[in-house]
């Protein structure tokens, strides 16, 4: 019932494909009626809830295919490939994108740890993405959030409260343990990722990242790979190249995109870009302008 009502709201508000701001910071509605293969993207901390159709995300070779039976929880910035390979006029994709505010998620984690049994200690960091089943609490909270966005006054006054309610529903649901580990004070990997993701144009070394996390180089490398499926250096490189690919697709020149993500050598940027995507940056730019 909730999913059907959310879809009705999105259909009523969106007459064309794309993302639409709702008036509640970090909450967007989306629609797609055209199949798009998985392309480079950068996921910020977020939830993606589908109410119709299906979506696909690939993290370092692992495919996450989901529809309205599961939502995607990504608590840290990650370089991925994402697409809507099954979207069509007959099977449209409708959904809601919700940014996860690290401050609020951390506050909720601390509050829950004070009032509920602590999570078992673990040496394994949570993996970067989790699919979680919709439950009654999540469905109700998401519907209330989307309904609040229908009225500007409700969006301004009730929106932040409804957003916090949705975060809490996530913490209590199937993704709860995953999210609490990611946003808890004891997760130095998530803090390291947040720091690096905001400084892609700066020189980054494993030693610097390990020191910020308070770990030895070996321990940091092991825990980082458990959390993201990538080594720290692979992560930084993929974040830079995915960010550059998105900027080029958005109209930025190849040289501007390269410099914007920290590359000082155009030849190195072109070589690494082609190795990862199978096309040179200029070929990629042409493909975005004239898709097959």
Image (tube, grey):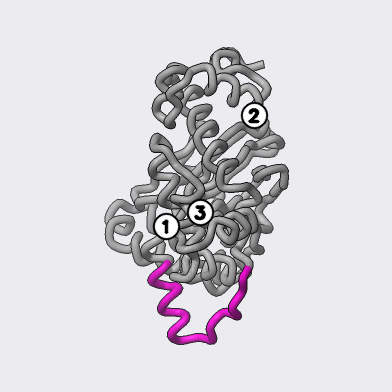
Q: Please give the residue where the numbered disc 3 appears in the rendered image.
A: 76
221 left or right of 116?
right
1 versus 22 height, above or below:
below
Report whether 225 appears left or right of 111.
Answer: right
Whether residue 70 is visible to the viewer of this picture, yes or no, is yes
* Circle 3/circle 1 CB separation < 8 Å: no
Looking at the picture, tell me which residue is in the foreground, 36 or 226: 226
Residue 128 seen by the camera: no
Q: Cα distance, mark 1 to mark 2?
A: 28 Å
Does residue 4 belong to the magenta stretch? no
Tell me whether circle 1 and circle 2 mark residues in contact (CB < 8 Å): no
Q: Earlier in the sequence, mark 1 or mark 2?
A: 1
Depth check, front residue: 113 or 291: 113
Q: Earlier in the sequence, mark 2 or mark 3?
A: 3
> Which mark identifies residue 212?
1
Q: Which residues are magenta?
A: 106-123
Depth check, mark 2 against mark 3: the one in front is 2
Residue 181's image quarter?
Answer: bottom right
Q: CA distance from mark 3 to mark 1?
A: 17 Å
Neighbourhood count class around disc 2 (C-alpha, 10 Å): few under 14, some 14–19, many 20 upward = some
What residue appears at the point 54 percent right and 46 percent down from the top-left corner?
78
Question: Where is residue 193 shown, x and y percent of the image?
Answer: 48, 52
- Circle 3 residues within 10 Å: few <14, some 14–19, many ≥20: many
Relative depth, front residue between 188 and 149 = 188
Q: Is residue 35 left or right of residue 138?
A: right
């Amino acid at each position: 019932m909730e999913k059907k009502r959310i879809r009705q709201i999105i259909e009523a508000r969106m007459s064309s494909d794309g993302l639409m701001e709702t008036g509640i910071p970090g909450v967007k509605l989306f629609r797609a009626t055209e199949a798009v293969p998985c392309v480079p993207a950068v996921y910020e901390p977020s939830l993606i809830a589908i109410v119709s159709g299906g979506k696909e995300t690939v993290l370092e070779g692992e495919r996450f295919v989901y529809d309205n039976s599961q939502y995607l929880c990504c608590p840290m910035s990650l370089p991925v490939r994402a697409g809507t390979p099954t979207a069509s006029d007959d099977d449209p994709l409708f959904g809601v994108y919700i940014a996860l505010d690290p401050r609020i998620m951390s506050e909720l984690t601390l509050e829950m740890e004070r009032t509920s049994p602590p999570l078992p200690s673990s040496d394994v960091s949570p993996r970067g993405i989790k699919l979680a089943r919709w439950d009654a609490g999540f469905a109700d909270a998401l519907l209330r959030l989307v309904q609040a966005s229908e009225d500007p006054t409700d969006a301004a006054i009730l929106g932040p409260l409804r957003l916090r309610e949705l975060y809490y529903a996530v913490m209590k649901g199937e993704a709860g343990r995953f999210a609490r580990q990611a946003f808890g004070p004891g997760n130095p990997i998530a803090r390291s990722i947040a720091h690096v993701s905001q400084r892609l144009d700066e020189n980054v070394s494993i030693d610097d990242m390990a020191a910020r996390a308070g770990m030895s180089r070996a321990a940091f490398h092991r825990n980082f790979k458990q959390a993201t499926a990538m080594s720290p250096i692979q992560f930084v490189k993929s974040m830079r190249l995915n960010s550059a690919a998105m900027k080029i697709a958005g109209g930025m020149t190849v040289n501007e995109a390269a410099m914007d993500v920290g590359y000082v050598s155009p030849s190195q940027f072109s070589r690494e870009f082609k190795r990862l995507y199978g096309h040179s940056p200029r070929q990629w730019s042409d493909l975005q302008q004239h898709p097959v």
